[in-house]
Amino acid sequence: MPTSGGGFEQAYNAQAIVDTDNMLIIAPTIKQACNDREQVKPMLDRLTKLPATLRKIEHLLTDNGFAGHKLYVLRKQTVEPMFGTIKSAMGLRQFSPRGLDKVKGEWTSVCLA
């Protein structure tokens, strides 16, 4: 991944579909892509593979706020706490294994916890 000071760093882009009613991550994934916008369709494809009771979509909220400002500001109390809990309470600031497949496994395990 490119860094702000120039150059590159081994990093991953964590993605998650969150059930905001239950505050649960229902579809986590990891990518080695900088652009979140390119991840919307693959994440929606993952959602269609979940059981019907988990795939009812009322609103889609993305980092760029395309789902409307009033809903977007709710992300800080519906979606972002999941990432905050993982970083602060669980202490995951970096991944332990090397390689995308192993990191996907660790990310999925952390999201289940």
Image (cartoon, grey):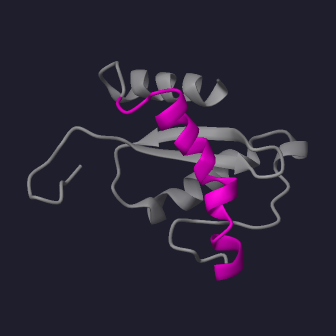
Q: Quadrant of residue 38?
A: bottom left
The image position of residue 53, as x and y in percent, is: 90, 44
The image position of residue 104, as x and y in percent, is: 47, 29
- Position of 92 relative to 73 (above/below): above
Magenta stretch: helix, strand or loop mostly? helix
| Residue at x-position 47% and y-position 65% | 37
Q: Residue furthest bottom?
A: 69
Q: Is residue 107 left or right of residue 33?
A: right
- Position of 72 relative to 112 (above/below): below
Q: Is residue 7 left or right of residue 36?
A: left
The image position of residue 66, as x and y in percent, is: 59, 77
The image position of residue 58, as x and y in percent, is: 82, 65
Q: Is residue 75 magenta?
A: yes
Q: Residue furthest right?
A: 53
| Residue at x-position 66% and y-position 45% | 46
Q: Is residue 29 left or right of residue 56?
A: left
Residue placed most toward the observer, 39 or 58: 58
Q: Is residue 8 left or right of residue 82?
A: left
Q: Which residues are magenta?
A: 69-94
Q: Is residue 16 magenta?
A: no
Residue placed most toward the observer, 91 or 41: 91
Q: Quadrant of residue 22?
A: top right
| Residue at x-position 17% and y-position 60% | 4
Tag count in the figure? 0
Q: Quadrant of the C terminus?
A: top right
